[in-house]
Amino acid sequence: MKQIDVCLTPDLLHLHTTENTIVVVADVFRATSCMVTAFAHGVASIIPVATIDECRVWQERGYLAAAERNARRVDGFELDNSPFTYMDDRIRGANIAMTTTNGTLAITRSRNAVKVLVGSFLNLDAIARYLKTEPYDVLVLCAGWKGRVNLEDTLFAGALVDRLKDGFAMAEDSAIMANRLYCDGKNNLVSYMANASHIRRLQRLGIQKDITYCLQHDLYDVVPVLRGTALVSMAV
Amino acid sequence: MKQIDVCLTPDLLHLHTTENTIVVVADVFRATSCMVTAFAHGVASIIPVATIDECRVWQERGYLAAAERNARRVDGFELDNSPFTYMDDRIRGANIAMTTTNGTLAITRSRNAVKVLVGSFLNLDAIARYLKTEPYDVLVLCAGWKGRVNLEDTLFAGALVDRLKDGFAMAEDSAIMANRLYCDGKNNLVSYMANASHIRRLQRLGIQKDITYCLQHDLYDVVPVLRGTALVSMAV
């Protein structure tokens, strides 16, 4: 039987194997929700980069620059980390260079996997359907917050476990824990998230609208995948 | 307000501060449950050591040797990792050298804290009452399983958060997650644990009796504390 495993933060990635495995990276608030929204609105590719300076280099070559540091926009960049900025006609066909506090790092650290996919609640069903058709094990990599676990990415992991549990065995307790938390909160994720640390940080920035948006399930039928150094939308 | 934080595995300890903090180490199946049981039955001290060989050195000096590796007893040692072996008159007043797969390592890695306490469901109330009287923040350090998170230690952390949440703020999402899992499962922890990975490992060893025992709350009014290199029972 195929296995589904959950890595609660990139700081625990050394304990997990990515061999023969498809990694699904989740940074629900807000990097991977932005990426999924961008592909649903026609972006051609997204290059995840580590630093603001790398982003600027790509910007000079005609890419749109997207960045967030500590949940704030960067001066001179076209895009920030609010998914609503990606619902714009000017991004259709564009290439984006994106750096975020946690999400892009998690993607670049997963390169050895069979495939690296970008997951969020917004494309949960598309991701689940795709994984069912593949012969590989699955590792959900939660981006977390500066190495620490966070509730929102864990809930996404638990939601994906829930969608896949008929065809996959849960490898370790992290998958069980994530799945139980999701089942506990799924009837009202917005209120379930209410006291979480990242929500408190985001609310200080006045972006409750983003939070509510990112917790919606199955809005978009896209599966972003890492090809070389760039994310593209897979035809599914 | 004092803070309570939860470190889900020693592999994440680098993200947490132990400064001005009392660390409560939990290795519910079964090291810290054994330690608490031992002190409740009159043991004088327990030295946590890293290796089987160190245990043997202390054994030659008159200590009782206790060990477990991969949940199995070690040849030639008086005690193993079943709490029932510590309910014996011969251990009254004895000194024990103990090494376990995960628990003793977690204790030795916490030495920089203000105090290091040994927690389990068996002495949950005693630990909670003690922490309320102290001015320090609290970090619950889950011993986990070879670096990975496990359900039983996380549930203990969540139980302690539950007992302390009136007087302590939850520092980060790990405390919220542990607490919600505990609240989800507390009405029947034995069945809540049924599919967890460690339970599956332990059940192969035929020790359901130990599991049921270790999940009982508030049996003993003891607070083991690290003094130098040895654990002793604190007068509370």
Image (cartoon, coloured by chain):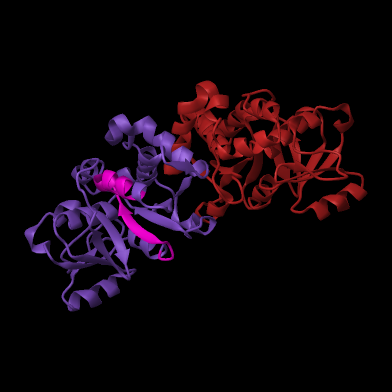
Chain colours: A red, B purple
A75 lies left or right of B47: right
Q: How many marks?
A: 0
Q: Position of residue B200 (x, y in %)?
A: 31, 43
Q: Residue at x 15, y 56 (%)?
A: B86
Q: Position of residue B62 (x, y in %)?
A: 15, 75
Q: Which residues are magenta?
A: B111-131
B208 lies left or right of A48: left
Q: Position of residue B131 (x, y in %)?
A: 35, 49
Asked whether residue A225 is in view, the answer is yes
Q: Nearer the viewer, residue A47 or A64?
A: A64
Q: Nearer the viewer, residue B94 or B135?
A: B135
Q: Nearer the viewer, residue A118 or B48?
A: B48
Asked whether residue A1 is in view, the answer is no
Q: Is residue B159 magenta?
A: no
B109 lies left or right of B126: right
Q: Residue furthest top?
A: A187
Q: Residue at x 30, y 46 (%)?
A: B129
Which quarter of the picture shows residue A217? top right
Which quarter of the picture shows residue B199? top left
Please determine whether, in this image, residue B17 is positioned above or below residue B217. Answer: below
Q: Position of residue B110 (x, y in %)?
A: 41, 62
Q: Residue at x 54, y 55 (%)?
A: B15
Q: Is residue B125 magenta?
A: yes
